Amino acid sequence: MFKQNSAILLVNLTRSNVFFTLTSLDGQILGSVSAGQFKTKGAKKVTVTTIKACLLKLNQSITQNLLFHVKFKGLSKHKRLILKLLTKNLNYAVLSFADITTLPHNGTKPTKIRRI
């Protein structure tokens, strides 16, 4: 039951843009939206109204009633807001959500100090 009606919503959050990609469990892309499609520039792409508009546009491409697995990638303060918009405003059933952001364990070696 869950396999046929399930989809994965990948949310890629960058400093200056937000990407939403809706895929099936097999990996086929069902729809994708980015904040740059709304002709906004710079930091205005990562605002609440733009994220809402992206989710509403993605909602138009969905034809059937789906259950979602949400995966977030990137560091942003809007992760809670996106989950809230999905569950409360758009009435999506979220089965699970995961944060797949890669974080370095120790980082790179700092450069040597130049001595003259």
Image: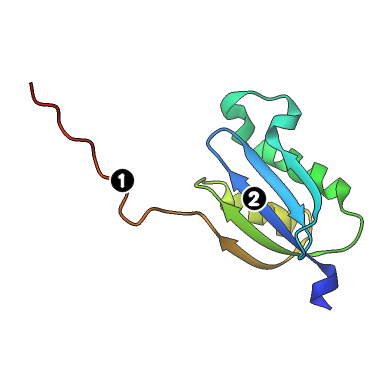
Report helix, strand or loop for mark 1.
loop
Residue occupying the point 24% across, 40% down: 110
**Outermost bottom residue:** 1
For label 2, the crowd category at 10 Å Cα-Cα, with few meaning under 14, some 14 to 19 and many 20 or more, is many
| In front of the other: 83 or 63 | 63
The mark total stands at 2
Report helix, strand or loop for mark 2.
strand
Kind of residue at disc 1: Thr
Mark 1, mark 2: which one is toward the viewer? 1
| Quarter assignment of residue 71 | bottom right
| In front of the other: 112 or 97 | 112
Q: Give the colouring mode of the picture.
A: rainbow
| Quarter assignment of residue 40 | top right
| Image x and y of residue 92, in percent | 77, 61
Which sits earlier in the primary sequence, circle 1 or circle 2? 2
Q: Distance between the residues labelled 1 and 2?
A: 27 Å
| Image x and y of residue 101, in percent | 51, 54
**Outermost left residue:** 116
- If the image is split into quadrants, where does the C terminus sit? top left
Classify 70 as above or below 19: below
Residue occupied by mark 2: 11
Classify 101 as above or below 2: above
Kind of residue at disc 2: Val
- If the image is split into quadrants, where does the N terminus sit? bottom right
Residue occupying the point 75% across, 29% down: 38
Classify 46 as above or below 7: above
Asked if labels 2 and 1 touch by Cβ distance under 8 angstroms, the answer is no
Residue occupied by mark 1: 108
Residue occupying the point 52% across, 46% down: 77
